[in-house]
Amino acid sequence: MVGNPFLITYFPFAMSSNNNRRVRVRFAPSPTGALHIGGVRTALYNYLFARQHGGDFILRIEDTDSQRFVPGAEEYIMKSLKWCGIHVDEGIEEGGPHAPYRQSERKEIYLKYAQQLVASGNAYYAFDTADELNALRAKAEAEGKTFAYDSTVRNSLQTSLALPADEVSARIARGDVWVIRFKMPENEDVQMDDLIRGHISINTSTLDDKVLYKSVDSLPTYHLANIVDDHLMEISHVIRGEEWLPSLPLHYLLYRAFGWQRPDFAHLPLLLKPQGQGKLSKRDGDKFGFPVFPLEWHAPDGTVAMGYREEGYLPQAFINMLALLGWNPGTEQELFSIDELINAFSLEHVSKSGARFNHDKAKWFNAQYLRQTDDNTLAQMVMPIHQQMGINATLQRTAEAISLIKERATFPKDLAELTQKMFCAPAVYDEKSVSKFWKEDNVARLRELREILAAEEVIDPLQTEQKVHAWIVDKGYSMGQIMNTLRIAIWGISQGPSIFHICAFIGKDETLSRIDSALQKL
């Protein structure tokens, strides 16, 4: 490639040219591994845009690169979208009027369109072998240049532009390996519009003649298959990652060469590393201890990568977090239901610059949604973890315990660990808490407090707390010292939820038993 294709001139936001078309968007991942959360965000933005405009969301699997195909990746993609609540209108499982939705099952479609471009003078056959091209690259490198297959060389190489027509036909007939390349116009300014980045202009002198179709595997490249499928599936808007921005001029020119109506384009910003420069990667997740995939991924080589679902994230929290990575609603609101996201979302408020991922913020979102979730639903999540701990409390009892501590939890596993303290007396006591509060005077006061609690018919959280506080004030004791000593005995550590609510939950007998046990052990 000659020059720098990133030397692009941006102008203010462009208006949509497809206002009269039914909104149809597609998410078109390649099954080359686990679905990155950046891909999930692309799917989410497409989905929100489609739903807001009463349109269709299509899932198309672009699996023409057979060398990079990974078994299980396609199923993983579909399961991930379902977990996120992103509902597909047309796809492999759902079917639809434009099936098949797997590109490898559409390969018979593409050759005729590639040949159509050759016939119209917009593409040509090239017979250069890989060794010949490598030799040309090496020669250019030795001369301090960069080899590009473009207008400066295409008429002097083994192409249908330079060879006699009968020789071209003979080579194809005898089975020579060939490709079809797009014939990039010479020195033309391509004028393009992007719904996020505005007007873009780029000169074709910086672009090479991309391969569109390869005879060796009878498959198209991404560029041809992408354009043909988007046209046949009546896609009105292409919302994709900014890594495809350098391909936009070629795609514009392909639409022009075919004489087809273009969709509107929008290129989303990258998800960036928490620290430093560059795109968020699995390596960053491994380094800082957070997932970069929606679901746990079991790779064919046996390695396992973390997933947000398995780490205890709620899908609503995960989606809310992703939506705000690159999009700003223009208000102070941070928590959105999916319906609120659909109503509020707009491409005009999507940032041009990359969005830096913040794992602490992701956890904050989960904590907020955990608190909004009803206690019975949370109890159903916690009970399987409790069973592994040997706790067999009822749904109602578990929900009651959760109601007392959910404000302190971020994940369901936190709920399980905290509520375990309600169902099981402390086996060990926090050393720092004991060192700070388990003093001789405090222990003596705890013995006095035990007698007050023993005299209660039942422990009522409000009444008992008032009575104990009045006793402490009357005696001139330290409220903090006594309360923290009591919490150590009941909870095992000096920090925790309202101790009188915990005492009421576990009951008078268990409260006295835990005090006696602490007095004996400590």
Image (tube, rainbow, N blue to C red):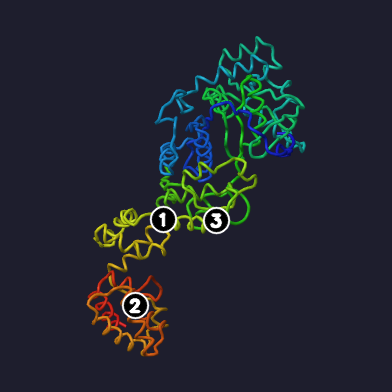
Amino acid, disc 1: Gln
Residue 333, position in %: x, y?
Answer: 54, 53
- Label drawn at residue 372: 1
Comparing marks 3 and 2, which lies closer to the viewer? 2
Quadrant of res 427: bottom left
Q: CA distance from mark 3 to mark 1?
A: 22 Å
The residue tagged 3 is: 358
- Work out whether residue 516 or residue 249 is closer to the camera in this orientation and state it: 516
Q: Label 2 is placed on what type of residue?
A: Glu
Numbered disc in front, either 3 or 1: 1
Placement of 414 over or under 13, stated as above or below: below
| Secondary structure of residue under mark 2 | helix
Q: Quadrant of the image for the N terminus?
A: top right
Mark 2 lies on residue: 465
Measuring from the top left, give residue 27's x and y in whole percent. 51, 35
Q: Are marks 3 and 2 in contact (CB under 8 Å)?
A: no
Q: Cα distance, mark 3 to mark 2?
A: 41 Å
Which numbered disc, 3 or 1, marks the residue that appears first in the sequence? 3
Residue at (31, 55) in percent of width and height: 376
- Label 3 environment density (alpha carbons within 10 Å; few <14, some 14–19, many ≥20): some
Q: Amino acid at mark 3?
A: Asn
Disc 3 on helix, strand or loop? loop
The foreground one among 403 and 464 is: 464
